[in-house]
Image (cartoon, helix red, strand yellow):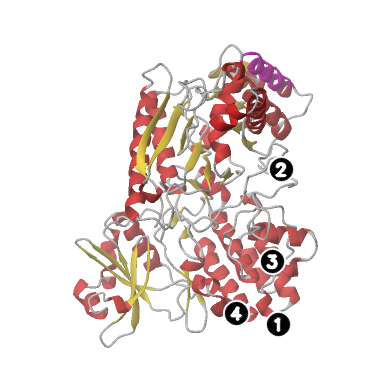
Amino acid sequence: MAWFITSWSPSLPVFIYLIIYLANYVAVAQPDYVYSLCPGMETVAPSSQYQTNVDTLISFLSSNTTITRIFHYTTAGNGANQVYGAFFCRIDQTIVFCEECISLAIDSLNAHCRGRRESIVWYDQCLVRYSNESFYGIMDDAPMIPMWNTQNAVDIQNVTSNQTSFLQALQGVLNVVSSEAARGASGQKFATGEDTFVGNLTSINMIYTLAECSPDISVSDCNACLQMTIGNMTELCNMKAGCTVMCPNCNIKYDINAFYGDALTPTSGPSAPPFLQDPPAESGRRNAFIAGISTVSLVILLGACIYLWKRKCKKAFTGKYFGPALVIEADEIETVESLKFGLTTLRKATNDFSADKKLGEGGFGEVYKGKLENGPDIAIKRLSINSKQGIGEFKTEVVLVAKLQHRNLVKLLGFCLSRKEKILVYEFLPNSSLDRFLLDPTKRASLNWRTRLKIIGGIARGLLYLHEDSRLKIVHRDLKPSNILLDEAMNPKIADFGMAKLFGLDQTQDNTDRIVGTFGYMAPEYIVAGHFSVKSDVYSFGIIVLELVSGLRNKYFRQQGDHESLLYQAWTLWNEGIPLKLTDPTFGDDFSVEEMTKCIHIGLLCIQEDAAKRPRMTSIVGALNGESISLPLPTPPLCLTGGADDNSINGGSDQPKNASGVLENITELYPR
């Protein structure tokens, strides 16, 4: 640019600079809306005392943004109508920017959640919440709202050493900033940090991180919240160039581009000339977001889902249940002596686990085909030494599957637990898994409608047995095509129970802070808040049904062009009254219109955002069997723009234009 400036009059480069500056300012002027959560169905009347107190409280919050920049907690009213509220703004943002962010959050709260007893609204830089119960000093780590860049920090085709360099740098600096933030050495629970990693083409790149907790929670609660968030972030955002995970009381963010606001020490870089210096607010906005403009926009992984975050609800399900056959003791595996195999026997059956016997490989280890001496063919799942499936999960799978007997569940023949070896022995199913057919165009074409309908029915009967008909009540938690095995007659059998959860007979739901499964098949309430139930399996079943009907995989983000998500296509075609356009073209006209329409209807009912509206497996099996069951009209699945539910992340005008709203199923949190 130097030659250009010296060759023209001074006014021209100034004009050009001004145009560029204004363009950047316009592009990044507003905070980024993320999500509105309005839990519970109970509403209050507009003229009620409670709503009046809510309005008063919001007014209190608005009037304090210029006084208390970071965090403010207040109440309005008293007795049964008392309302508690707070705002929390990122410490690296300027006062003026936080004021604008909180103002927008309050507007969103009124637009999405008015009339609710409790609400919370997230922007990327702040949140506003209120409740009919006090939450001051109480750590809420759910729901968890994750977002990530579509860009990878290191090319997926790049050398493993570069990927390792990035992950090691990320984990190291996240641990440092979370520890510093939890200590609150500066008087505020906030910290930033940077580190370098070897990027593409051996270049040395920077990674920037930020950790914060709301000031009202204790040091130990802050540390627990951040550690939980980091644990999920490293799995959710594997190799991504940037990621943010937000909870009500803590946030973690990293990016390969600097993103800190001007309330911190400005990052190095060219400065604007003196006559174009920003006032504090504008500078904070520009520097906070300019990196995001130069990279692929952040895509929201998941809008969110209805979830009660009340502390009393979180404590309602502790994960321990007592009663007949409900507690699996650590030594219970010893009661199934007849299922034990010797390691020597399995080595002989697989020719010492030779490569030519290998059927496949996943995140937990390898699967081999073997043959017992004077016996049948077997499938051997040999868990790797570094497998994330520990002894406890291994024992769970052995004990559960040994007790489960159904023609649509894979049959466990035995196990081997010897020193470092953890091996499961199953019946061998010659047609491998369902995903092999869906991924291969030739094999997919060989699956006619009658075969697919049989597979749908078999999976449904297997789930019905797990949920309602067996003496145990089990949630699978990882239902997907690769865990549906097919026998010689193409009968489906549900497999892989390492992540299954045993429920009490009167238990309906549970919570976890360790999210496991595969994107695209996990229910939204599970991935956002760790909330799961039998309806989580129903959601996964609905995705599989739509995949079998259409021949498509649920793997695309919703975007312009031909890459609309399967969920979006299915709902749109149903809403337009032309659902049969979803059918796999390989069928031709060789299918029953009534059966096809019914399966699409069932699929859409299963993937509804509200888990309570999803049907039970007993109703699904009955409908598939031709029983006279009236199926209700489905409501929109999560992440469809313009939905009727104004509490959906995509239902409001604040929704970012670059939001995808659909989970991608290629990345696994705990790959199999």
Position of residue 464 relative to residue 454, above or below, is: above
Q: Amino acid at mark 3?
A: Ile
Q: Residue 600, labelled with which disc?
A: 3
Q: Amino acid at mark 2?
A: Gly
Q: Are marks 2 and 3 in contact (CB under 8 Å)?
A: no
Mark 2 vs mark 4, foreground winner is: 4
Q: Which residue is mark 4?
A: 445
Earlier along the polypeptide chain: callout 2 or callout 3?
3
Q: Are marks 2 and 1 in contact (CB under 8 Å)?
A: no
> Judging from the image, what secondary structure is the residue with disc 2 in?
loop
Q: Residue 651, labelled with which disc?
A: 2
Mark 1 vs mark 3, foreground winner is: 1
Earlier along the polypeptide chain: callout 4 or callout 1?
4
Earlier along the polypeptide chain: callout 3 or callout 4?
4
Mark 4 vs mark 1, foreground winner is: 4
Mark 3 vs mark 4, foreground winner is: 4
Check if residue 56 falls in the magenta segment.
yes
Within 10 angstroms of label 3, few (less than 14), some, or many (20 or more) residues? many
Residue at the spot 66% in from the left edge and 32% down from the top edge: 23
Image quarter hosting the C terminus? bottom left
Q: Residue 590, labelled with which disc?
A: 1
How far separated are the C-alphas under marks 1 and 3? 16 Å
Earlier along the polypeptide chain: callout 2 or callout 1?
1
Residue at the spot 71% in from the left edge and 35% down from the top edge: 112
How far separated are the C-alphas under marks 4 and 1? 12 Å
How far separated are the C-alphas under marks 2 and 1? 38 Å
Within 10 angstroms of label 2, few (less than 14), some, or many (20 or more) residues? some
How far separated are the C-alphas under marks 2 and 3? 24 Å
How far separated are the C-alphas under marks 3 and 4? 19 Å
Position of residue 243 relative to residue 500, above or below, is: above
Where does the magenta region start and end? 52-65
